[in-house]
Image (spheres, rainbow, N blue to C red):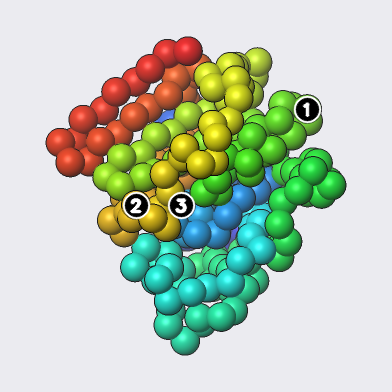
Amino acid sequence: MSVIQDFLRYNRQVILPEIGEEGQEKLKSAKVLVIGAGGLGCPILQYIAPAGVGTIGIVDFDTIEIHNLHRQILYTEKQVGLAKASTAKTTVEKLNPLIKVLAFEEKLTLENAAKIIAEFDIVVDGSDNFKTRYLVNDTCVALNKTLVYGSILGFEGQIAVFNHQGSKNLRDLFPEPPNPKDVPNCSFNGVLGTLPGMIGTMMAHETLKLIIGLPSLQNQLVLFKTLDWSFTKLTF
């Protein structure tokens, strides 16, 4: 590292022998795209930005609503009605003014997914629907991009890493998305606000490990049940 300001800010992680100055430089050079600035996206952004990920993209077409606030802790009540992507960008830039943050206030579609994702090294999917998850997965496979996956419902969450250095992808685990009518979601089934915080933080942790080159999930799906604090790791 060449800047004293960097050293002072990141010293507590740089002194870890597994990270060091080389690892911090990798973080500084990394480009990470976060899909969704909601329940999962907020904690993901709150941890990868202060860690020093040099370029962060945020994709979200939605606006902040009052019912988001119990779990989407980047936002305040005064910001209800504002666009999530640009609002998150402003907050993240305050968390770490040394990094570059890009906001994409648009819905990810077949028409724009490749163009947006192509500019980044790692994609972290915090979306809340299977249509977007499969679109992100398929685009990452086509562009050979690493994908950090996570999902939540009720008191349970899961995370995985797809398409990293030849590893399997979402369709190897679940070849086709389920019928939307058969899939419960937080809007109708609810979620305790701390759960996306935990799963999002785990996704952020895995993202930082991938950038630095530390051991990460390989063809494994981690299931986390918070009512009894049980972890299950499935190999696929």
Is residue 236 placed above or below 64 in the rendered structure? above
Question: Residue 235 appears in which quarter of the rendering?
Answer: top left
Quote the CA–CA distance across marks 3 and 1: 24 Å
Toward the viewer: 135 or 78?
135
User: Three-letter amino acid code at disc 3?
Assistant: Leu
Name which residue lies at 64% across and 34% down.
134
Residue furthest to the left in view is 228
Residue beneath label 1, please? Answer: 142
SS under mark 2: helix
Asked whether residue 211 is in view, the answer is no
- The numbered mark, 2 or 1, whose residue comes first in the sequence reads 1
Where is residue 91? Give x, y as percent: 53, 72
Where is residue 192? Give x, y as percent: 28, 56
Image side of residue 67 versus residue 119, left or right: left
- The numbered mark, 2 or 3, whose residue comes first in the sequence reads 3
User: Three-letter amino acid code at disc 1?
Assistant: Ala
Name which residue lies at 52% across and 73% down.
64
Residue beneath label 3, please? Answer: 40
Toward the viewer: 99 or 8?
99
